[in-house]
């Protein structure tokens, strides 16, 4: 037990470091850039209309105060952290004067649900099928499955999502292709709303699963096909251990240890995929919010979404890491 | 080197297919050197012509011949992928070999930084850079930024090999013979990690071209620079699918798929080649 606590402690330290450096990086990128957020926002606001000069001067003063950019960078950095701890990123420009954090918190549950469900389905399907394919290498069906995996796996998220959009929205329109739920249902705990949410999530989740499962399948197949040649597997087979016990308890369990590490390492990439999927299917999550914010030139909202997504991914990785000792008793014992 | 190549083609059907696919794409990209039109110009031909004998890939709504347009786009995308892969390989070799060989606190610090880079989701960061740089973001800047994020996985892999090399006899001999650390790493250890470097090179290209396509499709790169991603961006912004100019979308998508499957097959078969057990199984031993 003590070994486990040390392990958790180390990981916790790493989690804090990742959040600290990641959020600091988002701050530095935005504040060390030669382009002033005030001028950028002003340029955007005055691009399509003629404003009188006094109004522009007043707007510039207001924006400078809002972003606090005339202070030295160190002070800005300390202020940034002081406000961030309270979850305050300032008002958004996209939906002025709603605080940026409110918008982020409204979008976060959508992304987290989609990401968690898609990742779980992908991980389970990919690893179970991959494990079986590695164990019984002459199975025709599993071989064909492997070919499909090789074919789909390398294609970028965007292209897969886009093809699905065309197939299910254009050629064979059976599923809703845009939004988080239908317009005519009221959000709450009632069946029409829930079924609408599930229907709307199907395509985004399906596209994430399609792109993701191949990696797990191929990884697991390679791992298992190496493990089955180990002596202890042959020994167990000779000793008459049930085949199902060998596959699940002896082979797959050992292969899952590196796969779980890979899951922790892949989460950042999966999140990137979710962002794109959300944009393609117009899903009301963090990704759509980030892209809207960039297009609207909303400085505070972009900072808020980036910081929150860095933090969220870091926490997700931390949670996956905590599962690690359950599979690998050596981590517990140390 | 040639023997390795020959064996790979003979015994590994995936490698052969991958080589053919990538080769075709590279030849197509190289045709752009003989392009009769400047790919950045618009309204040079009749718009919206379907594929025909005159326009092999049709023309788009911006009056560009898709054949030459995509050829230039493919060249830019591949160059981009190569740049990111080369730069990030340099970082990962430097970090991986140093961490593995020197060990101690240097190793711990480098791997700590490594883990931070692994955990940071790259896409929001890239969008952030675009948000800040806007039109100053050209493909070289983007390549530099992505190279800074593309090394940690492979650095860890290289480190694990370097850890094993450190305790081999020849390393000790080299050290006793008075070789400097830099020389040991570059002359003695580097050749051993080269197969990994090649295999991860392909994977890195896949990753970087894929991200570039994604960013470009959203309009978050320099959209006037023809790449596969910006071709799709323009097709979307002219609603090509709704108007019925399907070749504007279908051909670039088919090309991405061919490139990606080709590169992926190469990377996969090289990975398998590195592992002697699976190599022997394939050769029927």
Image (tube, coloured by chain):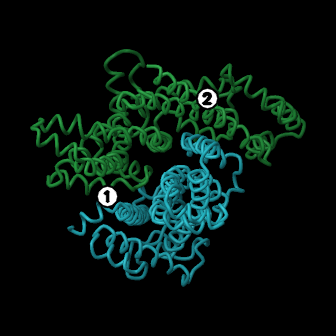
Chain colours: A green, B cyan
From this view, report whether residue B282 is shown above or below residue A68: below
Residue furthest to the top in view is A189
Secondary structure of the residue carrying numbered label 2: helix
* Circle 1 chain: A
Residue under label 2, please give it. Answer: A16
**In the rendered image, which quarter is residue B111 located in?**
top right
The x, y position of residue B202, in whole percent, is 46, 63
* Residue at x 62%, y 67% (from the top left corner): B177
Q: Camera-side residue: B257 or B82?
A: B82
From this view, report whether residue B136 is shown above or below residue A91: below
* Circle 2 chain: A
Horizontal side, residue B108 vs residue A24: left or right? left
Question: Crowding near pointer 2: few (<14 within 10 Å), some, many (20+)?
Answer: some
The x, y position of residue A18, in whole percent, is 60, 35
Q: Nearer the viewer, mark 2 or mark 1?
A: 2
Q: Camera-side residue: B194 or A184?
A: B194
* Residue at x 61%, y 48% (from the top left corner): B126
Q: Tell me the number on the disc at residue A151.
A: 1
- The disc, 2 or 1, on the residue closer to the chain's N-terminal end is 2
* Residue at x 47%, y 24% (from the top left corner): A3
In which quadrant will I find the C terminus of chain B?
Answer: bottom left
The x, y position of residue A156, in whole percent, is 43, 53
Q: Camera-side residue: B124 or B267?
A: B267
From this view, report whether residue A198 is shown above or below residue B96: above
Secondary structure of the residue carrying numbered label 1: helix
Q: Camera-side residue: B45 or A319?
A: A319
In which quadrant will I find the N terminus of chain B?
Answer: bottom left
Q: Are marks 2 and 1 on the same chain?
A: yes
**In the rendered image, which quarter is residue B135 located in?**
bottom right
**In the rendered image, which quarter is residue B118 located in?**
top right
């Amino acid at each position: 037990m003590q070994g486990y606590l040390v392990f958790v402690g180390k990981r916790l330290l790493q989690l804090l470091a990742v959040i600290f450096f990641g959020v600091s990086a988002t701050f530095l990128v935005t504040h060390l850039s030669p382009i002033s957020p005030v001028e950028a926002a002003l340029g955007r606001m005055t691009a399509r209309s003629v404003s009188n000069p006094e109004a522009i001067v007043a707007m510039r003063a207001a924006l400078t105060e809002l972003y606090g950019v005339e202070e030295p960078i160190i002070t800005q950095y300390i202020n940034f952290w002081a406000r961030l701890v309270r979850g305050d990123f300032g008002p958004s420009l996209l939906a002025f004067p709603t605080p940026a954090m409110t918008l982020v918190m409204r979008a976060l549950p959508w992304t987290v649900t989609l990401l968690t469900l898609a990742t779980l389905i992908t991980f389970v399907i990919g690893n179970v099928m991959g494990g079986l394919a590695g164990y019984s290498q002459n199975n025709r069906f599993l071989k064909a499955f492997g070919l499909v995996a090789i074919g789909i796996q390398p294609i970028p998220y965007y292209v897969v999502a886009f093809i699905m959009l065309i197939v299910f929205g254009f050629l064979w329109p059976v599923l809703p292709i845009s939004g988080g739920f239908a317009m005519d249902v009221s959000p709450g705990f009632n069946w029409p709303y829930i079924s609408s949410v599930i229907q709307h999530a199907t395509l985004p989740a399906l596209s994430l699963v399609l792109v993701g499962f191949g990696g797990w399948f191929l990884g697991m197949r390679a791992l298992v096909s190496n493990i089955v040649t180990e002596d202890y597997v042959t020994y167990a087979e000779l000793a008459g251990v049930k085949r199902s016990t060998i596959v699940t308890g002896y082979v797959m369990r050992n292969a899952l240890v590196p796969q779980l590490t890979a899951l922790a390492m892949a989460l950042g990439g999966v999140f990137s995929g979710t962002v794109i999927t959300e944009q393609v299917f117009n899903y009301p999550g963090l990704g759509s919010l980030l892209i809207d914010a960039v297009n609207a030139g909303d400085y505070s909202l972009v900072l808020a979404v980036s910081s929150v997504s860095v933090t969220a991914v870091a926490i997700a990785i931390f949670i996956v890491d905590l599962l690690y000792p359950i599979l690998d008793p050596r981590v517990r014992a140390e | 080197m040639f023997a390795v190549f020959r064996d790979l083609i003979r015994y590994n059907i995936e490698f052969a297919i991958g080589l053919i696919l990538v080769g075709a794409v590279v030849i197509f990209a190289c045709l752009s050197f003989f392009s009769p039109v400047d790919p950045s110009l618009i309204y040079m031909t009749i718009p919206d012509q379907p594929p025909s004998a005159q326009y092999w890939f049709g023309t788009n709504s911006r009056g560009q011949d898709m054949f030459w347009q995509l050829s230039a786009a493919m060249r830019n995308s591949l160059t981009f992928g190569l740049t990111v892969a080369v730069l990030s390989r340099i970082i990962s070799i430097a970090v991986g070999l140093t961490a593995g060989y020197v060990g101690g606190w240097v190793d711990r610090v480098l791997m700590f930084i490594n883990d931070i880079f692994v955990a940071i989701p790259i896409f929001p960061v890239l969008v952030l850079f675009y948000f800040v740089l806007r039109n100053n973001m050209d493909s070289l800047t983007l390549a530099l930024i992505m190279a800074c994020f593309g090394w940690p996985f492979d650095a860890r892999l290289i480190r694990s090999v370097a850890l094993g090399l450190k305790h081999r006899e020849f390393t000790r001999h080299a050290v006793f013979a008075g070789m400097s650390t830099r020389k040991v790493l570059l002359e003695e250890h580097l050749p051993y990690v080269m197969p990994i470097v090649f295999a991860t090179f392909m994977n890195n290209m896949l990753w970087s071209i894929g991200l570039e396509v994604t960013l470009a499709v959203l309009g978050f790169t320099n959209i006037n620079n023809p790449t596969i991603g910006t071709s799709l961006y323009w097709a979307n912004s002219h609603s090509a699918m709704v108007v019925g100019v399907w070749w504007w979308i279908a051909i670039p998508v088919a090309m991405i798929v061919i490139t990606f499957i080709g590169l992926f097959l190469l990377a996969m078969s090289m990975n398998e080649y590195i592992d002697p057990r699976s190599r022997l199984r394939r050769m029927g031993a």
